[in-house]
Amino acid sequence: MANPYGDVELDPRGMRALAHPVRLAILSRLQGDGPSTATALAPLVGATPSVTSWHLRHLAEHGLVRDADVESDGRQRWWEAVGSGFRFAATDEASLDAATVLERTIMEQAAALPERWARDVEPLLEVDWRRSAGLSNTTVEVTADELADIEAAIEQVLAPYVLRKRGRRPEGARRVRMLRYVLPEAPAVDDPGHGVGATGAAAGATAAAGEDGGDRP
């Protein structure tokens, strides 16, 4: 699948490195809030400044964060996210395990977001914002190739908004998080293809996540 958002593309080592709740939380904060220091991030991600700093260096080794070019007194190191998101794809048996662990970590962190939004944010929204907000639950019958085409089409629609710089946002624009869970069903027992090529089908799955669209399994 193409990468219209300019996301960081992870190899299996990068997948394993990011499959840690604190690292994932650090990256999410940097993507959403901009450059920060280990000291400022620590209470937000549930770790000490020294542990947060260690995780930041680990993320940097895999190209997910880097030193930020900000004015400071030089006593603290500033970090920023590389790109607005990341994506990963399982292409063989070795990368499948790494992708599965990372995907589950992402889904665990995203699980509480809808409930938190409904409790804390939705009651404060104006009518015009509430009109387009909320949950969509649609089931379709498609082939694996058709599903990939649907995902690519959605990304093409979102890409101009993902890539739009903050200074070019129109008046009244707000951040909107889109959580898109794509959940294919397992083959039926009486399906002629059941048990054939199951590993290959799973290995072709892709996922991406970031501030541009929340989590996109």
Image (spheres, rainbow, N blue to C red):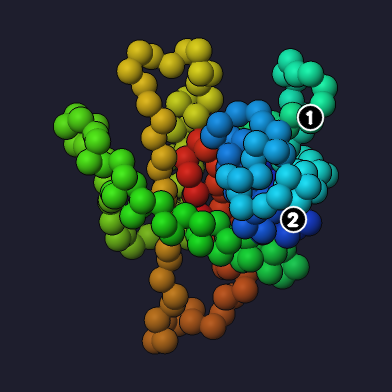
Compared with 4, 9 (above or below) is below
Packing grade of label 1 (10 A; few <14, some 14-19, many >=20) is few
| Element type where label 2 sits in the image | helix
Q: Position of residue 156 (x, y in %)?
A: 47, 34
Q: What amino acid is labelled 2 in the image?
A: Ala
Kindly indicate the quadrant of the structure image that contains residue 199: bottom right
Q: Nearer the viewer, mark 2 or mark 1?
A: 1
Q: Nearer the viewer, residue 142 or 34?
A: 34
Q: What amino acid is labelled 1 in the image?
A: Gln
Q: Mark 1 highlights which residue?
A: 76
Question: In percent of the image, x 56 and y 80: which residue is there?
Answer: 196
Question: In percent of the image, x 73 and y 45: which residue is there?
Answer: 49
Q: Position of residue 150 (x, y in %)?
A: 42, 47
- Pointer 2 with pointer 1, Cβ within 8 A: no
- Please indicate, yes or no, whether residue 186 appears anywhere in the rendered image: yes
Sequence order check, earlier mark of 2 and 1: 2
Check residue 17 in the rendering and tell me which mark sits there, or answer none. 2
Compared with 78, 53 (above or below) is below
Q: Position of residue 4 (x, y in %)?
A: 56, 33
Compared with 127, 192 (above or below) is below
**Left/right of residue 17 with respect to residue 194 in the rendered view:** right
Q: Residue furthest left?
A: 127
Kindly indicate the quadrant of the structure image that contains residue 33: top right
Compared with 47, 185 (above or below) is below
